[in-house]
Amino acid sequence: MTQNPAVAAVLVLEDGRVFGGTSFGATGTAFGEAVFATGMTGYQETLTDPSYRRQVVVATAPQIGNTGWVAEDDESAGIQVAGFVIRDLSPAPSNWRATSSLPDAMSSQGVVGIAGVDTRALTRHLRTAGAMRCGIFTGDAVVATGDMVAAVRDIPSMAGLNLTDEVSTSATYTVPADDTAPDLGLSVAAVDLGIKANTPRSFAARGITTHVVPASVTVDEILALGVDGVFLSNGPGDPATADHAVALTREILTRRIPLFGICFGNQILGRALGFGTYKLKFGHRGINQPVIDHVTGATLVTSQNHGFAVEFPAAASEAVATEFGTVRVGFSSLNDGVVEGLNCLDVPAFSVQFHPEAAAGPHDASYLFDRFVELMRAAAEAETPDLARSI
Amino acid sequence: MPRRTELKHILVIGSGPIVIGQACEFDYSGTQACRVLRDEGLRVSLINSNPATIMTDPEFADATYIEPITAEFVEKVLLDQKRQGFPVDAILATLGGQTALNTAIALHDAGMLAKHGVELIGADIPAIQRGEDRQIFKDIVRDIGGDVPDSAVCHSMEEVRLTVEQLGLPVVIRPSFTMGGLGSGLAYTPDDLERIASIGLAASPVHEVLIEESVLGWKEYELELMRDGADNAVVVCSIENIDPMGVHTGDSMTVAPAMTLTDREYQDMRDLGLKVLRAVGVATGGCNIQFAIQPDTGRMIVIEMNPRVSRSSALASKATGFPIAKIAAKLAIGYHLSEIANDITKATPAAFEPTLDYVVVKIPRFAFEKFPGADPTLTTTMKSVGEAMSIGRSFAEAFGKALRSMETKNLGFWTLPDPDGETVEEVLAAAAIPTDGRIFQVERALRYGATVAQVHEATGIDPWFLDQIVLIQSVATEVATAKELSADLLRKAKRYGLSDLQIARIRSTTATVVTERSIREVRRALGVRPVYKTVDTCAAEFEAFTPYHYSAYETDPAAESEVAPQRDRPKVIILGSGPNRIGQGIEFDYSCVHAAMALRDAGYETVMVNCNPETVSTDYDTSDRLYFEPLTAEDVLEVIAAEQESGTVAGVIVTLGGQTPLKLAGILAAEGVPLLGTSPDAIDLAEDRARFGALLAAAGLPAPAFGMATSFDEASTVASRIGYPVLVRPSYVLGGRGMEIVYDEPSLADYISRATEITDESPVMVDRFLDDAIEIDVDALCDGTDIYLGGVMEHIEEAGVHSGDSACVLPPITLGRSDIDKVRLYTERIALDGGVRGLLNVQYALKGETLYVLEANQRASRTVPFSSKATAVPLAKAAARIMTGSTIAELRAEGMLMTVGDGGTLPAGAPVAVKEAVMPFHRFRRPDGTGVDTILGPEMRSTGEVMGIDAAFGPAFAKSQAGSYGSLPLKGTVFVSVANRDKRSMVFPIKRLADIGFTVVATAGTAEMLRRNGMQVQVVRKHFEGDGNVVEMIRAGEIDLVINTPYGQSGTRIDGFEIRTAAVSADIPCITTVAGAAAAIQGIEAMVRGNVGVASLQNLQAGLRAAVAAENAGADAFSDTFVTGTVPAS
């Protein structure tokens, strides 16, 4: 296995703070927004999650690489993060499914990593100062601190960044329903804003065929697919820039086609309903994030990865009238009260800010796929699609 | 949902004495529960027979009953509370281990819950049964789509044999409803099967064992889960066992979080865990589920669940900062997870799953050296007596810290020489059998050239952990071969967990010995110091408000430390007692916790250092700051330095945590650390035989004659000079290790021949043994001017039984006023001449009119909690105050000590408290499967103790037996076989038993003597005399009580061995001393008369204080506190 013989590396933050370490994975430089993720499992799913595009992920879990790289666990075509910051790298992976090691996977895909960093001190800094731009410099790339800080400050901020085109599929592809699942004869168009592999898998397991469509898709193209519902995926970037997706969503809402959005999709639905979005100080990135389902009162432990959130114009307990009828907050974070989901009461649409498809993370919220399937089934059977009944 | 307002009075059931498999983790959980419930404004009653617990301190409940934990006594408590106008609404039994849960089931089965209108909260009976009944549980797991090992439940040996015909060997045998895996084992051969299964059937209260497909060598995991009344559930912690399946999880080295699972696998396990939790129906609270994973295929099976808070819950709580027991108590009274605040972040709720940015390692502590002949192989029966936990920023760092927290001879890798001429094949073969210290064999095997694959093959330990050891070795090689130690290299060594001592050993050559101290000096000169991070439940996502710290080394020399400055209050650092072991357990933690409470009240900032996850002292609520660190000189000095930087350290307390911190006194003093209380020199004075002897001689206090010897000839000369019997022991050990009583020269020769480690440097001590003397234990306080006798305890067994194993009674029942005056006078002399500032324990032997001083310890003793509870005075709190400058006169004036008199002048009507030791003999087997001997001797072997308290000795003793070994029989058959020297003194006790109605069975010699005294006696054969012998009768359940004193005069002969082990196996009382028999008979009489009542400690102590005041005023006003808990006929 590849173990770089202790090539020095540094992590430089835009505020001038520098953390030392050693290089692993590819060498060179990497730039992005420094964010910390608190999951104790699932570094591979995190690295391959398109929502982490242009971000340098700091793992708070201190032992990384333990289970190596498992080919079948990739959540997209490859590693998406800009760089990876860890405390301790495993000398060798150990898992019966492992096909490679973490540093080998990173090297072969050209992803720069830094190990040996005091990730707790770094996390405490990001928690206080907020997510910010950073750069990883390894080996010969390590130059005078001032020059490195200047290079970091040269990259664009996440706010105002449209990354959808970087991650979206260029052509529609179809993930068929599982043979073993009951055939409901339903299909969904999943708008790829940075979709993870486990989303079509979650539909397939429920007997649903998924057409993953490019973010540039038009409503006519969706109608032509003859689907029973539309799914808005997760994805990277600032939702304020996603004008096409917002316009598309409004078309779908107008036509009363069942719609389900997650993560970035939640922000898109929010904007389509006329709400604003804003950037959180350091975001929610972890697989232990508690939310309350306001409809059932249940507490769920969810997988989250978001730096932006929806601005709901009233208290979470209140209903708000929008162009598309009444809307309520479906879920809230129990940690800080951030809006974690929207329920439309007059059109068949809802969304959540967290990841019901998990991967990485707990499966507590997977019932939301069932909720959406029920919504589509009711619509297909020409009943009045009614979210309240699906719940 | 907010809390259930209709619940107003909760009875909490504790877990009783410390035994293997059920230790002080249940004091931690019970204490938390009591705190929480009282904070909620509920009335709390508590029953627990273990006086050494914090939970049984009177301030933790409204009514504390130190009574046996049986359904019968619980009912008496319910009635006593009702009589006082406080009917109990509900019982909380899920925080007191298997003991509490079994008692709850017994209460239910006897219809007592319904009869008294009491609800069981936290878990309902059907859920307990679903979780604990192995077959029902397996069916549940299959129903929800989980996998389980193939198995069958058997109720007889015939069923067992049939099952094994189908499954094939090896198989696992697990008895139902036992704790800590008691009676379970792995059978490789038909012989193993016969032996283990028959023991298992006997050990199970329902005569049921599970015979199961072996999953030996599979990866082993545990999840700790919690669920609230609205069906919200979270996983608090995942734990991975380094030792694979086949070793009881309590005996395994474990790590948290799980290290070798991908997210997919972990989430599958989590899903299954939550499904099991819901299907079993744990209503609210915590549970623990064990899983096994086939390492090559990933097949995951569910092994078992505990539908209650467990040992692992305590570990998980300490590992994550998520207080499981506290939350469980809140859930039990109706709260939901989302309504409970996370103590540490304050801003976020408990409805989440903790995430760790550090690694936690737990290593068990064993005591096989105490049980010669016991099979040291680790199996599915738990054998460890304690554990240490450590926290580090990497596995290697945490692992190194955990290994040096053990306080065994082995202070980490490379600190002991390798065995001479050991080959890689030999060490691999040895490592294939799990034993205490196997990890050192693993390290050697890898160092001798075995591959990770070979070691994995031999041990089943996951390659990930083996690779970590290889990594640690490579750092050690770097350290060994470096020209000189640079700051970078030292920092690297530290990051991989190497201690200064290990580095010193690695750097030493045959030519030069490098000392730990020189490494410390180099390291400090280079500025290589640890930083302190915080356990915060959330990997720094939110701010933490709880200073719960651990040390770590980072590469950055200027790395951030999270110790907050605090300059308003002086700090006192209290050093805890480390992992529990025989001789040093919960009693010492009790004193440390008391010091923390007293000094916090007195205006100090209290700082606790300890590494034992089971304890109350390592609850972040106990002290103002908690450092979870090994108790080695290096780790402690660094904590002290960090605290000195953050404020003013008034001093460090080393005299409350037993030998562990006491050992550090010298080095701390040498480093200029201010120590509170008795000075290191004064401590040494009591520990050094020669200096102490000189002190006694100067004061004119008698001590048994003694001498030292380095050979048999010398020993023989000494022995003839002072006269047989003599007590012989190596001079360098503590806790009675290797101590024997020798009655004649041949046995002395035998002892010397076995004691191979005798050299000029470590001679053998030969003491006059005072046969038939009464042993007396004294706990006292001294402030340099005055002394205060905390408690004077009379041993029930005669001298020769280790004080920790002997039952004792307070106040003394046979000592006269003049004897106690003499005890006071001697104790005062020793305390004042010895320079004691704080607690002192002295052991005396009274033979005839002479009071001999046996030994003194200038520190808190094992009996401090017992004395404190029996005399209504918090001795350890008072000691902490004296150490920080208060006088006894001041403490009397403020009411912490009795205003007049002390524990030596208890009023005539004071209640009688009996302490009984609990022995772990039934846990240990010889390799051939026979039991180990149960005879009491000078070497301590008990794991815990109970207290029986009542108005008179008889009922108090009966309670102490009921609390420790199960109730004494009130009728039936007694078997008597006593040594010649004991025959005379046994006549009256046995006659009394016959008069009560017992059938007396005896061996020929004893029978003849009893018949001559007019008793009807049935003669039975000795065990080697053929069919129908006494051992067979015991096994057949025909004997209810055994009285057997050893015939032999030497500890090496094992007469009566078979009888005693059979009695232990059959779970019937076995009395091995004359005094014990007399006490037992008083207890039986008390119970036959039916006058065994219950009283709360609060009432007893109030009564005692009132009596002291009244006696002082000249009246005899001790009230009749005990109420006979007669149960009305239903």
Image (cartoon, coloured by chain):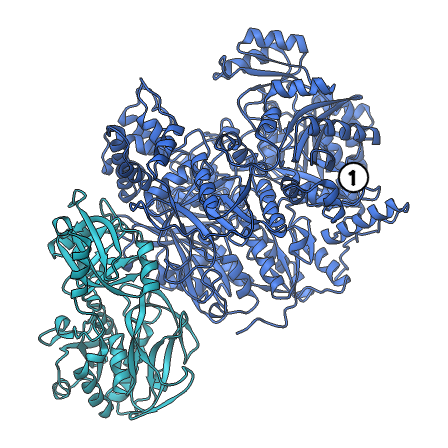
Chain colours: A cyan, B blue
Residue B776 appears in which quarter of the rendering? top right
Residue B590 appears in which quarter of the rendering? top right
User: In the depicted view, which residue is nearer to us: B441 or B499?
Assistant: B499
Residue B1098 in picture, x, y percent from top left: 73, 53
Residue A8 in picture, x, y percent from top left: 19, 46
Residue B166 in picture, x, y percent from top left: 36, 47
Residue B1011 in picture, x, y percent from top left: 79, 25
Identify whether B696 is placed above or below B391.
Answer: above
User: In the depicted view, which residue is nearer to us: B931 or B653?
Assistant: B653
| Residue picked out by circle 1 | B997
Q: Is residue B865 left or right of residue B469?
A: right
Q: Is residue A182 left or right of residue B809?
A: left
Identify whether B200 is placed above or below A391.
Answer: above
Residue A370 appears in the figure: yes
Q: Is residue A380 left or right of residue B718?
A: left
Residue at the left extreme? A171
Amino acid type at mark 1: Gly
Name the residue located 35 percent from the left edge and 69 percent from the top edge: A364
Residue at the front extreme? A146
Report the label total: 1
Residue B217 appears in the figure: no
Chain under numbered label 1: B
Residue A196 appears in which quarter of the rendering? bottom left
Name the residue located 69 percent from the left edge and 49 percent from the top edge: B67
Q: Is residue B32 left or right of residue B875?
A: left
User: In the depicted view, which residue is nearer to us: B141 or B66?
Assistant: B66
Identify whether A121 is placed above or below B835.
Answer: below
Name the residue located 82 percent from the left edge and 46 percent from the top edge: B1108
Check the picture and name the quadrant holding the C terminus of chain B.
bottom right
